[in-house]
Amino acid sequence: MRIELERRPRQSSLFAVVSPLLALALTVLFGGIMFALLGKDPVAALYSFFIEPLLEVWSLHELAIKAAPLILIAVGLSVCYRSNNWNIGAEGQFTVGAIVGAIVPITFYEWHSPLLLPLMMIMGAIGGAAYGAIPALLKTRFNTNEILTSLMLVYIAQLFLDWLTRGIWKDPAGYNFPQSRSFVTEGVLPEVLSSGRAHYGIVFAIIAAIAVWFMMRYTLKGFQVNVLGQSERAGRFAGFSGRKMVWFSMMFSGALAGLAGISEVSGSIGHLQPSISPGYGFTAIIVAFLGRLNPLGIIASGFVLALTYLGGEGAQLSIGVSDKVTRVFQGLLLFFVLSCDTLILYKVRIVFDRVRAVSAKAAS
């Protein structure tokens, strides 16, 4: 006996829309069961996780801060995944973007200029794109699996950041704390509104999502991404280069991840430190799939996943659960999103080998 997946002849458009909502509902249901097993009131726990963060103005600003990098990274990843290139290393590109974007304000820490902030954003995007180019080079030149190379590069980037902030970039006036000099005022992303800390990173994220949606829907490059992602052979027949698409998708997603990295450091932290991300690059994979790899859908799913971060922090204080609960919620959501998608695209068949052999013999 074995289980086989048979692809359905056509995908239901209704279920394609309902699938992420069903995945979210199942996540909440099983999350409630998890809280009950932990000895917590499921209703109170889910309230503190998903509702309470939406009731205060300051927490809405914090929600926007956490959603900004998730949306930016996921929008870039959606281009990768739709072109059938699997960039799993956005966390590393996020980190390198923050490092490269911070070169000028840390090295020339006395430079005050209106050009500083735009230069930091551009350099951050370039740094992320360059880091994304490494797995693209390895794939096109040596046929190396980009999933493994992009993932391994994450840990190199994180260790390099740790070395910088504890070594040559350590603030000499920082009382021996492992962090760089603080950015000058001209190197800090301004706040969108005076009522909270939300900065222009969320504006970058929404603009990027709309721009990529337009590219995917109305431009030749978007058509190339979709064709090569669905059938590389058909793409070659149309004159599209699969190798060029590997470079484009990996560097494009890396650039947006790098922009997210320097935006996070400039807008929320104000300096470099050994840890600048709670795992945004990995969580953005869930955001991309929950948003159906559609940039506009990713905006909504980015806020949903940001809510799990913010609600998880609040739940630690209000009901006394571990910060690992946040990761469990995110893992459950990814599991149910992929499971629902699989059942939409495929039929599950249980095949008994003996019956199949008898049927084949009778047919012959």
Image (cartoon, rainbow, N blue to C red):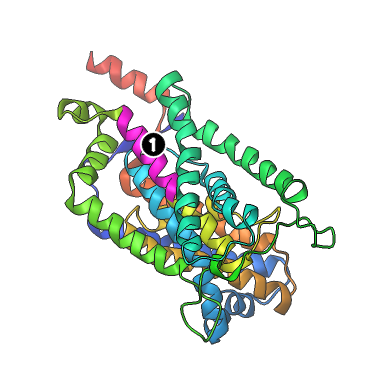
Marker count (numbered): 1
Type of amino acid at the residue the image marks with label 1: Asn
List the residue tagged with mark 1. Answer: 85
Query: Which percent across, then down, holds residue 132?
Result: 47, 39
- Residue at the spot x=56%, y=46% of the render? 96
* Between 233 and 120, the one nearer to me in the picture: 120
* Displayed quadrant of residue 102: bottom right
Does residue 41 appear to the left or right of 286 in the view shown? right
Is there any visible trace of residue 25 in the rendered image? no
Query: Image height check: is 245 above or below 265?
Result: above
- Residue at the spot x=49%, y=32% of the render? 134
Query: Image height check: is 31 above or below 169?
Result: below
- Residue 273 within the segment the image draws in magenta: no
The span shown in magenta is: 243-255
* Displayed quadrant of residue 310: bottom right
* Between 13 and 288, the one nearer to me in the picture: 288
- Residue 253 within the segment the image draws in magenta: yes
- Residue at the spot x=44%, y=60% of the render? 71
